[in-house]
Image: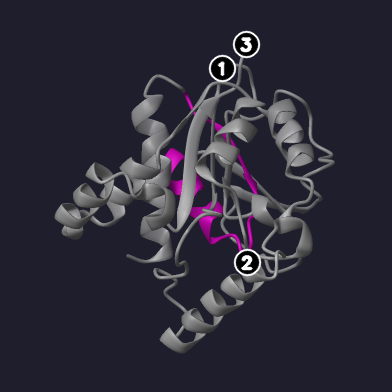
């Protein structure tokens, strides 16, 4: 499954859980080249604001507006977005709590948010990275394990560590009620491996098996 299909699988989890929410404005925190922002604009048929601290963003359609911005101090109005989306960006933001507070501030009350990061307890990661060779994936995993063994596997020290499901859920709770959707997400993107995914869930091995953790919630109040 390519990156676009993974993005759509994630936002469909939002739509399934909040079918009555009218999504007319989306904020993408950590937009990279902007491909995800473009997909969200098409999926929800709405305007999307995409922010990041670097210049990898490539011009997209008129529905997507890019702003170079630190997620920890957004120059955006409070209560201005119907959905806040962040996919594998929060692990690069230190401290993550500052970005979470800003996400809460700019999100409208009772509207949804979705956040995904690497799973800090994963045995292996990068398996589904479509643009990396097997050798590159092995090297990335070796770097992760070397950082673990040296006690340096933390976001603050620049490792691609991410958060455990519990840690990510606790961060999401700073915005409002949230739930883990990791099991549902992996069922969807690995539909052809349903028996394997079902066995992992039945054996309660998600803590180490899932490469990433995903939550969906809504802003309190």
Question: Which numbered marker is on residue 148?
Answer: 2
Crowd band around label 3 with a 10 angstrom C-alpha radius: few (<14), some (14–19), many (20+): few
For the residues labelled 1 and 2, the Cα–Cα distance comes to 38 Å
Crowd band around label 2 with a 10 angstrom C-alpha radius: few (<14), some (14–19), many (20+): some
Find residue 179 and report its horizontal and vertical position in percent.
46, 29
- In the structure shown, which secondary structural element does the residue marked by tag 2 occupy? helix
Residue farthest along the bottom direction in this orientation:
135
Query: What residue did someone put label 1 on?
Result: 110
For the residues labelled 3 and 1, the Cα–Cα distance comes to 6 Å
Is 206 placed above or below 177 here?
A: below
Quadrant of res 211: bottom left
Task: Judge whether residue 134 can be spotted in this image.
Answer: yes
In-front residue for pair 150/28: 150
In this image, 25 relative to 210: left or right? right
Quadrant of res 159: bottom right
In this image, 159 relative to 142: left or right? right
Tell me the magenta residue range: 22-45
Q: Earlier in the sequence, mark 3 or mark 1?
A: 1
Crowd band around label 1 with a 10 angstrom C-alpha radius: few (<14), some (14–19), many (20+): some
Tag nearer the camera, 3 or 2: 2
Question: Which numbered marker is on residue 221?
Answer: 3
Q: Do the residues labelled 3 and 2 touch (CB within 8 Å)?
A: no
Residue at 32 percent of width and 65 percent of height: 1
Q: Are marks 3 and 1 in contact (CB under 8 Å)?
A: yes
Is 3 placed above or below 90 here?
A: below
In this image, 7 relative to 82: left or right? left
Find residue 109 and report its horizontal and vertical position in percent.
62, 17
Find residue 125 and report its horizontal and vertical position in percent.
47, 66
């Amino acid at each position: 499954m390519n990156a676009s299909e993974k993005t759509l699988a994630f936002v469909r989890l939002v739509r399934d859980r909040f079918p009555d929410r009218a999504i007319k404005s989306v904020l993408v925190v950590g937009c990279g080249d902007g491909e995800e922002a473009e997909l969200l604009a098409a999926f929800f048929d709405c305007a999307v604001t995409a922010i990041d601290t670097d210049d990898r963003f490539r011009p997209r359609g008129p529905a997507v507006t890019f702003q170079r911005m630190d997620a920890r101090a957004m120059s955006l109005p409070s209560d201005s977005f119907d959905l806040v989306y962040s996919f594998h960006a929060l692990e690069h933001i230190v401290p993550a709590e500052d970005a979470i507070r800003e996400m809460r501030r700019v999100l409208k009350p009772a509207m949804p948010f979705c956040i995904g990061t690497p799973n800090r307890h994963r045995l292996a990661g990068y398996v589904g990275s479509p643009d990396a060779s097997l050798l590159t994936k092995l090297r990335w995993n070796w770097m992760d394990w070397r950082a673990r063994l040296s006690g340096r596997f933390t976001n603050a020290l620049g490792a691609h560590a991410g958060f455990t499901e519990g840690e990510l859920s606790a961060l999401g709770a700073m915005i409002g009620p949230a739930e883990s959707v990791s099991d549902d997400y992996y069922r969807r993107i690995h539909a052809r491996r349903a028996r394997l995914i079902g066995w992992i869930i039945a054996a309660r091995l998600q803590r180490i098996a899932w490469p990433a953790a995903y939550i969906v919630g809504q802003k309190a109040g």
